Amino acid sequence: MKALVFSRKPAKFAAAMLAGRLSPGGGAKVGPLALRDVDPPDLPGPGWVRVRPRLAGICGSDLATIDGTSSRWFEPIVSFPFTPGHEVVGELDDGTRVVIVPVLSCVARGISPVCGSCAAGAINHCERLGYGDLEPGLQCGFCESTGGGWSTLMVAHQDQLVAVPDAVSDEAAVLVEPTACAVHAARQVTATRVAVIGAGTLGLLTIAALRSTRPGLEILATAKHPHQRALAAELGADAVVAPGELDRAIRSRTGSMRLDNGQLTDGIEAVVDCVGSAESLAQALRIAAPGGTIHVVGMPGVTTVDLTPLWQREVALRGAYAYERADFDAAIGLVTSLDLGRLVTATYPLGRYEDAVAHAATAGARGAVKIAFDLRSERERNSI
Amino acid sequence: MPRPGFVLEVDKSTPPILFHHGESLRLERLPAGRSRVLYPGEPLDALDDVDGAIRQALDNPLGDSEPLRALLRPGMKLTIAFDDISLPLPPMRRPDVRQRVIEAVLDLAAAAGVDDVHLIAALALHRRMTEAELRHAVGDRVYDAFAPHGLLYNHDAEDPDNLAFLGSTEQGEEVEINKRAADSDLLVYVNINLVSMDGGWKSTATGLASYRSLRHHHNVRTMLQSRSFMDRHKSELHSSNWRMGEVLRKSGVQIFQIETTLNNDTFGTSGPMSVLQKREWEWTARDRATFIGMKAGLDRMPTKARRKIFNSWKAPYGVTSVQAGEVEAVHEATTANVFKQQLVEIEGQTDILTMGLPYICPYNVNSIMNPILVMCLGLGYFFNMYRGRPLVREGGVLIMSHPTPWEFNPVHHPSYIDFFEQVLADTTDPLEIEAKYEKQYAEDEWYRHLYRTSYAYHGVHPFYMWYWGSHALSHLGKVIIVGGEARSVRRLGFTPASTLNDALEMASDVVGRHGTITHLHNPPIVMADVT
C-alpha cells in the first residue's frame, strides 16, 4: 500500500531543518519523509480495526516534524518509522465513516487496569504514555504500530472511533479532531475577556469554540491575512487586529497605562496562544494582566522567551494539549452547525505531498486555512 | 496693488497646475473645457507699523468696551490667553504677532501697576506647546520673564482643580473653562485669525475649555449643522460657542478680545518656495527650473529629511489688521478682513472637486500628517472653505492628492494610532463612532496622562478630526486620494488612485464622463464664495 513514511535518518533530518528554515515546508523535499510502498500495519490485538482514510489533514505539529523544528521531548513517545496523519476521517471495512480520536490511551495500548487519568476520561493526561502493547506513540500518526492518515490504510482501536453522521461531509469531519483541541482549550478559559493570538486553523477553531461555549465572552483576535480576519470575525471574534496592533488594542480596551518601552501596566485576563512561537509567547506575556493566564494551544518548540513578566506579574502559563473523549461530541456539533468543512481550502493526492506540505506551511499567505490529503481516489485504497 | 483671487477656465493652453502633495508637489494637467481653477488672491498689503496698529487698537476698542489701559489697575488679576501652535499655518517668521500684541499689553499692564499676570496657551485639547514653541509665539523676553516663575503655561483641560464651571446655556451646554481665566478681573485673549472659523467667542469657550464643555459643540450633530463652519452665521459650531459666550458674560468674566489678521504671503516673493504662490502660466524659466529641481530633490530625499525641510519653513506673513475690544464687535471686523484676503466668488457648484493637500494642518505642526489628519484637512478644512454652498455638488466626488502614509507621531498622536487601528477598522460612520467609542477614548487614563504630562493630543482628539469631516462625508458621493498609500486610504474608507487621470476615470462612474471639475488652488488659503 502507499504511505508517506517518516524515518529516523539524522542526515536527512538535518537537511530538513535547513530547508525548512529557508522555505517553510521545504523539509518535505529533502527530509526523512517519503512516499513508499509498505505493508499494511498488522492489527495489534483484539478490539483493533482497519481504517481506510478518506481525508487526512496536515497539522502544525506535522509541519514542525517535517521541517525538523519539533522538540526532542517527543523522541521517547514516538516510534520510527511512522506514517503521519492524526486528523483523519476514514471508513471501516463495513463502510462506516468514522473520525479517529488519535490519542493512544491505556485502553488502546492494552494497559489494564487503566491509569487514573484515562479512567477519568482525561486521555490526554495518560500516565502510562509510551508503555503497553504498542510501539511508543502519543497519537496515531506518530506511532509505528498504528500507521497514520497519510496512507491508504491504518489501524485504530474501537475505543478511538467516533461515528460520523451522514449529514457531516468528509471535509467537515476531517476538522473534528482539531476542533476537539479547540473545544478543550476553550473549556480552560474562565475569563470574561480573552485575546486569541493566531488565526490559522487552530486559532479560528478556538475562536469558534470560545464563542459557542461562552456567548458573553469578549474575544479579541489577531489575524495576519484578510481571509483570516474575515473568518475570525465571522466565527465570533468581537474585534480582529493585525498582530502588531494587539498590544495597543489591549491597552485601549483595558484602559491600561503604558510605560516608556511600550510595556503595559495592566492587560487582559486571558490569552490563548494558538501559534506557540517565541514571538507569540513573548507577546502573550506582554499583554496578560497581572494574575492572568496564558493558554498555550499552538504547539511550541524549544523557544527563548523572557519569563520576567511571568514572575513579576504572577501570570500562569498553561498548556492545552489535545482533548478528552467528550470533546469530540462537542466538536462534531460545532463543525456541523458552523459548516466548518469550508475551512478545507485544498486537498492533494499523496503523490503530491511536497506541494501539499508547502501549501500547508504557507497557508495563511496563500489565502488558505486547512490543507488535507484526499485518499478517496487513491488507486490502491480499495484493493487492500 | 495685489490682484484679487479669480477663477481660471482651463483650456488647451493652460499649463499643468500645481498640486501640493504632502512633503512633495505634483503638476497635473486638468481636462480642458470642463475644468476651472480657483486661485487665491495675492497677499494684501501688510501694515507698515504693526506695533502702532496694535497700540491704536488697544486704545480705540470696538463695541462696548473701554480702552485696555482703562481696564487695568493695581492689584488686579490679569490673564492673557493666546492661540496655540495650531495657528498660523505654517508658523510665521519672528516676531510672531502674538508676541507683539502680548508685549504691548504687558507694557500697558506694567504702566498701570498690574503685577498679578498669568499667560496661558489656550490649547483646549491640543498638545502642550514645548518651550521652543512658546518662545516662538511670545518671544524670549516674555518667556524668560514669566515661564520660570510658573506664570506662563499651557492650559490643562483635565486639571479638575483648575477648571471653573460657570453654568449652562439654555440648551443645556455646560460651560467650564480655565479657573485662572474665569477668576481673573480681566481676561485678554490674543488671537491669530488665520481663517474665518477662528476667534470670537470660540477663542475662550473652546480654547480654554474642558472636555465636559467642548463635547457640546465638538460633535457630529453640530458639524452636520454647520454649513459651513467657516461661515459663522451658518455654523452651529459657532452658535454653540456664542451661546456659551453669553454664559461667560453673564457669569462676570470680563474679556478684552484682540484679533489679528494675516495676509496670504505663505511662501514669500523670493527664494525657491516663492514659486508655490505664483500662477503657473506666469512662471518664468527660472521658476520652472526651480520647481523641477525642488521636486526632483524632494522626491529623492528620505521622508524625514523632506519633513524637516518643510517643518523648518516659517512664513513671511504680513499683518493686515488688528482689532480689539468687545468680543463680537471685534470678531465682525476681523472676519471682514479675513474675507477681504481669502474670499473669491465662483459661480455654481462642480461635479468633481480636486485639491492638493500640503504637508501641514493645524494638528501636525512639527509633527507627522497622519491619515486621520489627511481626512480632516481635506474633508474638514478644505471642503468647508466655502460660503453659500459647498463648492462640490451633493453626490459629487472629492479628489485629494496626498501620500497618506500609515505613519503616526507616537508622542503627539497616541490615541490617533488606536483610533486608526481599532475604530476605523470597525466603522467609518461618524455617528456610530461617536456613540460606540468616544467615551472610552475621552476617559482613557493613559491618554489623559500623556495629554497632561507629555506632548500628546487628548484621547478624544482624533474623534473630533473625524467629526470635522462629517458634513463632507454625508455630502459626497465618493472620495479618492491620488498617490496615497493604498491600505491607509482604504482604512479611511476612501478609494486610492495612482494618478489624477485614474482618479478622474473612477469619478466618472459617479458623475458621468463629462463631469465638471474645480481645483481649489490652496495654499495660500482661498475660500470659495459660491453663488
Image (cartoon, coloured by chain):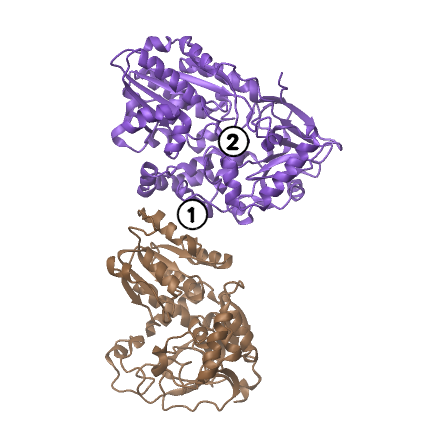
Chain colours: A brown, B purple
**Secondary structure under the numbered disc 2 in the rendered image:** helix
Tags 1 and 2 on a common chain:
yes
Between tags 1 and 2, which lies in front? 2
Q: Residues within 10 Å of mark 1 (few under 14, many from 20)?
A: many
From the viewer's perspective, tell me whether residue B44 is left or right of residue A257: right
Chain ID, mark 1: B
Q: Which sits in the foreground, A37 or A146?
A: A37
From the viewer's perspective, tell me whether residue B154 is left or right of residue B221: left
Q: Which residue is mark 2?
A: B381
Q: Which picture quadrant has residue A113?
A: bottom left
Q: Which sits in the foreground, A106 or B239?
A: B239
From the viewer's perspective, tell me whether residue B222 is left or right of residue B149: right
Q: Which picture quadrant has residue A147?
A: bottom left
Question: In the image, residue B161 lies at what x, y percent?
Answer: 25, 30
Q: Residue at x 28, y 18 (%)?
A: B184
Chain ID, mark 2: B
Q: Residues within 10 Å of mark 2 (few under 14, many from 20)?
A: many
Q: Which residue is mark 1?
A: B422
Question: Amino acid under label 1?
Answer: Gln
The alpha-carbon separation of the residues under discs 1 and 2 comes to: 24 Å
Q: How many marks?
A: 2
